Image: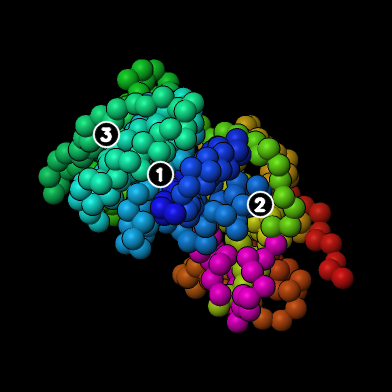
Amino acid sequence: MTPLGLLVHGPEVIDDGNVEDAIACLKAAGFEVEAALGGISGKTAVIDAGLRAIIDISRDLRPSAVVADFFHRGRDFIVAVNHAKSEESGCVLGEGILSNFLKRHGAKEDISFVQLEYSSLIIIPWLIKPGHEGIYRTIRDAFGTHREKAPHRLEACCTGDSKVVRRVIRGVQPGEKIVVNGVIIGTVSADNQEQRITLVARDGKLTEIMGGTLIEHNLWKLPPLKLEDELIKTAGVIRRTKPRRMVSGGGAWGEELVPKRRVACFFYTLESLFPKLVDPHTAVAVAVTVGDDTTSIAGDILKRFDIRLIGITDGDADGLISGITSGALDEYAKFLPPGSVIIRLKPERDDVVGKDVKERIFGGLEELDLEGEPEQQFEELKRRILELARGEILEILSSSPQPEKT
């Protein structure tokens, strides 16, 4: 059988059953399919659907890096499966993935790259390697409900020089959040009708969003940027769909993992969350999160693994999670793992207290070794954080305790 690499992107294509449909069609057409997720936003959807044995989510790779991994292992025909918010944004995604791969890993004649876009039921033959024409015809015939859309010319998204760089992002919608490497740095203007924004960086620092508004107090979370290489996306919420089913028992990632030490982990953003969850040398016992969106997203993930959370928030949620609208503390209850706590601070104080927690409790690092009885360690960590936040606390929300294991 001809081997194919299947790149899965985003939670929607999983929640709606598109991935299972694509795999079934490709296998029925005689292909051997290996599937892997690109990005992190779809990982909880894979877990919910019980597809971890079918879709590899063990690594934290950008979509273009998944393509590169397939390519370097000899799978040079890649099919990307996506369900975008619009046909335009779906095309922008496919173009960006392919452009990033070509920039770093290969030439156009080295690879075949086809996109199945379920938002509008189209199939886009971005590149067909010489000799792969028959493979593509078989795939196209297998997806008879998808109309073929000719790919447009790949365009450079960045202009500028060593001092000032401008990067155009197309396919955006008014009011969407703009996310750079997991940090919400702005919003698309409400009157933006061009479906595009331009990010401007000077000497590696974001200074302007043409067609949008910067959230300047979040910019300190970003290291110096090479704007042309950064992972940038826009979204209203990070998961627009609900799972058709939820398979219970997220639990551990594998019985073969025997952690050597228990740790508490500190997060401003969640780009490193899943790598820490699958690290064979550590067991994450507690996650300390800073920021409303980071806390709600982390809680939604960690409750699937029975990992407790201490969230430091100040009520300025950007609404990236469906269900967090007003920012009221009780909205977070459904996102909390059992036995967790959220500390609500005065406005604009979560980052300040978060810095103190990282420096004075975590020693400037992102991990803290925990030794001794788990409940005592959690309570001691919570006590120290509350002590540092003293005078800034407005409310505290605690979830129901974890059930005793028998």
Query: Which one is nearer the viewer's eye here, 77 or 97?
Result: 77
Q: Which mark is residue 50?
A: 2
Prevailing SS of the magenta stretch: loop
Q: Residues within 10 Å of mark 3 (few under 14, many from 20)?
A: some
Q: Is residue 137 above or below residue 251?
A: above
- The Cα atoms of the two marked residues, 2 and 3, are separated by 37 Å
Q: Is residue 375 above or below residue 113?
A: below
Q: Which mark is residue 168?
A: 3
Three-letter amino acid code at the position of disc 1: Val
Numbered range of the magenta stretch: 251-280
- The Cα atoms of the two marked residues, 1 and 3, are separated by 26 Å
| SS assignment at label 3 | strand
User: Would residue 92 appear left or right of 37 to someone viewing this image?
Assistant: left
Residue under pointer 1: 79
Mark 2 or mark 3: name the one nearer the start of the chain: 2
The answer to whether mark 1 and mark 3 are in CB contact below 8 A is: no
Q: Residues within 10 Å of mark 1 (few under 14, many from 20)?
A: many
Nearest to viewer (mark 2 / mark 1): 1
Query: Which one is nearer the viewer's eye here, 215 or 387?
Result: 215
Residue visible at 33% across and 60% down in the picture: 74
Q: What is the basis of the colouring in this image?
A: rainbow
Does residue 259 belong to the magenta stretch? Answer: yes
- The Cα atoms of the two marked residues, 2 and 1, are separated by 22 Å
